Image (tube, rainbow, N blue to C red):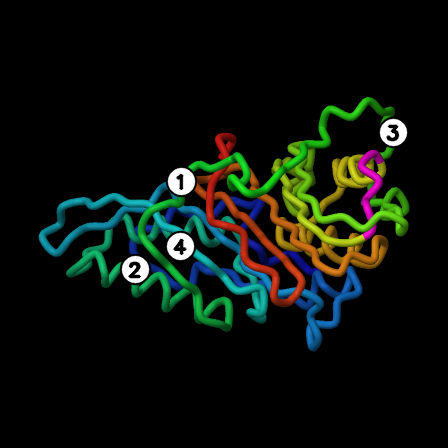
Amino acid sequence: MDLANLPLGRHVDYPREYDASLLFPIARTLGREHIGIDSGALPFEGTDRWHAYELSWLDGRGKPRVGTATITVPATSPNLVESKSLKLYLNSFNATRFDSDESVRARIAHDLSSAAGAPVEVAFGLPPINEAAPEDTVMDCIDGLDLDVDDYGPPNAAHLSADAAHVVSETLTSSLLKSNCPVTGQPDWARIVIAYRGPRLDRAGLLRYLVSFRDHAEFHEQCVERVFVDLLARTGATQLSVEARYTRRGGLDINPWRGTPGHPRPAAGRDERQ
């Protein structure tokens, strides 16, 4: 992937007025080619849910307004939107007057839809913090497993295995997922939730696999798609859902989710670390 022209990782002047051209779309095919995903026949459905904590604009009389927003980009969109460009774009609203709050929401939805190449949902406000699983879901954290680890990258799917003699439905979670920005090398931290039905996963192997992302450089969305594809290929799961809740950077956090077709989307929420 050619990242030479990205605003990420280099000095960019602070925007002084609204400017939709600040948005930098990246073709999803560039990352998916490295994972072996045929964009013409995606093995998943999903969304990239962004939470924007630093949003402000001026009303028609010049008085500042502040808010938060939840932005949902479909995984079927041709492009993802690079995170620093999204931050700069949202900052460009700071000194710009709008007649109404709705005109701001509609403008953001229009511009992001144009950049992503598909309809993007924008709503003011944030989902609640709901780190725990829904009442009817048993979620097991695998971080307390007693094991030795010495593989920190690149991601190693050879760690994954499953017991075909035992078919289960379970939800596993880990807060030990870490990867790095492919441009700046800065760390990206996340809690990942894996829900599946199929041969029982070897939990130690799963944890070693997740830790093997630790020195890997890849965008958030592509990391989640890599986990999904590797799990599907190595375990024979008939149903699979992978969601990662990444911690905030620059007033934004992202929560990519990928699931087998027909799998219900996880309830929107935030973790305390976000």
The front one of 237 and 78 is 237
Where is mark 4, residue-wise? 89
- CA gap, disc 1 to disc 4? 25 Å
Q: Are marks 1 and 3 in contact (CB under 8 Å)?
A: no
Q: Is residue 203 magenta?
A: yes
- Which one is earlier in the sequence, the residue at label 3 or at label 2? 2
- Which one is earlier in the sequence, the residue at label 1 or at label 4? 4
Q: Nearer the viewer, mark 2 or mark 4?
A: 2
Depicted 269 relative to depicted 98: above or below: above
Report which quarter residue 43 is drawn in. Answer: bottom right
Type of the residue with mark 1: Pro
Type of the residue with mark 3: Asp
Depicted 128 relative to depicted 150: above or below: below
Q: Are marks 1 and 4 in contact (CB under 8 Å)?
A: no
Type of the residue with mark 4: Tyr
- Which one is earlier in the sequence, the residue at label 1 or at label 3? 1
- Which one is earlier in the sequence, the residue at label 1 or at label 2? 2
Percent coordinates x, y for residue 11 in the rendering: 50, 44
Percent coordinates x, y for residue 200 in the rendering: 81, 46
Percent coordinates x, y for residue 36 in the rendering: 80, 65
Q: Which type of secondary structure does the marked residue at label 2 adopt? A: helix
Percent coordinates x, y for residue 253 in the rendering: 49, 43
- Position of 254 with respect to 108 (left or right) is right
Q: Nearer the viewer, mark 1 or mark 2?
A: 1
Question: Residue placed at 40% from the left, 51% from the top?
Answer: 70
Where is mark 3, residue-wise? 150
Depicted 246 relative to depicted 31: above or below: above
- CA gap, disc 4 to disc 3? 41 Å
Q: Which type of secondary structure does the marked residue at label 1 adopt? A: loop
Where is mark 1, residue-wise? 128
Depicted 140 relative to depicted 232: above or below: above
